[in-house]
Image: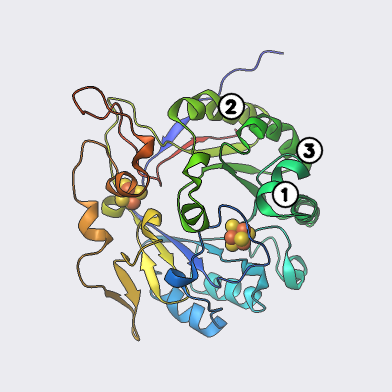
Amino acid sequence: MHHLCKMKKTVAFAKNAVNVFFHITTRCNLKCAHCYINFAQHGQLTLPAETVSQWLSFFSKPGKDANLVLLGGEPTLHPQLPEIIRAARNMGYGSVTIDTNGYLFHDILDKVAPTDVDYFSFSLDGPDPETNDAIRGCGCYEACTRGIKRAVEKGFSTSVIYTVSRQNLHKLSEMPALLKDLGVNRFFIQVIGIRGRSAKAGQDALQLTRLQWEENVPPVAQAVSNAGISVTYPKVFLEPDDIFECAGNVAENYFIFPNGRVYRCPLCEDYPLHSLEIGARGLVLTPKINEADLFSLNIAEGCVINKLVQGGNIDYDQQGQPLWQVACCLLKEEISAD
Ligand code: SF4
Ligand code: SF4
């Protein structure tokens, strides 16, 4: 049967919303190959619920929509997660998403309602145990898909996040059928970054080339949307007439770690480059030089931090000019299901 192609659109950076990504713990039961949690930079704490609530209050501002993503480590290892979710709701956070590896500890699905949580977002890196468990660990596919089924049965909206590397690219095309089968509402394709454990292991060999990305990711995204599931993936490579923008300059995204560091750019999280930290009464600016000093540098390659930490994804012509610009890692393409 012939499907009409749905239109992809680039999601503009929201000017009137605050997006808060709060790592409430760095503890996790897994050791995924591409995990970016880095104890030296992010600490090893699990923050008490009162601390999480206090810090959350520093980011909710009147007149701005605030969206919260709770993550870790594994956030469901936090025994007070239900309290944290309710505190965020009471503070006016408009959406709350829980990013989980699927183990769903402390019976979290029985302790919160679909009205409390907008999405449970499950990390799954393959359509079968062989592919997924080679990356995320033995038994993980089974645990994660069981978690998705239980969440769907209980009436929660669900998403799946698939981190594409050379290790699982060839299996991406099998995901639409699985997602449909599981009753998942949204699919996020993520690109492997060279951070945390991946950086230490020298796993730049896992990164996709522009060609691999373009030949595989957009067609699968189209197939996912044809199956009635919304799909989002990073833009990564800009076209010649696209205008480069750094989210650090034009949007309000905050990536909070349990040691009190607050980053505006996820690519900086492996370094002590955070521009903000939590003080006793609110956010304080960190001394120069920090990520914010880098956001305003204009370079031909697009994103400055990408060039510094993973410049291998840019190619140059004989005059030394970049053949393309790399987009902000937060710039997304979206194909909605309706
Ligand atoms: S589940 Fe997440 S936090 Fe845990 S090891 Fe894997 S990537 Fe890291
Ligand atoms: S990824 Fe690059 S463009 Fe995006 S916020 Fe970070 S420095 Fe700015």
- Mark 2, Cα crowd under 10 Å, few <14 / some 14-19 / many 20+, is many
Please tell me which residue is depicted at 73% across the width and 69% down the height of the picture: 105
Q: Which residue is mark 1?
A: 133
Between the C-alphas of marks 3 and 1, the distance is 20 Å
| Vertical arrangement, residue 325 with respect to residue 137, above or below | above
Q: Which residue is mark 3?
A: 181
**Figure disc tally:** 3
- Nearest to viewer (mark 1 / mark 2): 1
Rendered-image quarter of ligand 1 = bottom right
Between the C-alphas of marks 1 and 2, the distance is 26 Å
Q: Amino acid at mark 2?
A: Gln
Residue 74: x and y, percent? 62, 66
Decide which of 206, 154 is in the foreground and name it: 206
Left or right: residue 269 versus residue 139 is: left
Q: Quadrant of residue 285?
A: bottom left
Q: Which residue is mark 2?
A: 222
Residue 13: x and y, percent? 36, 46
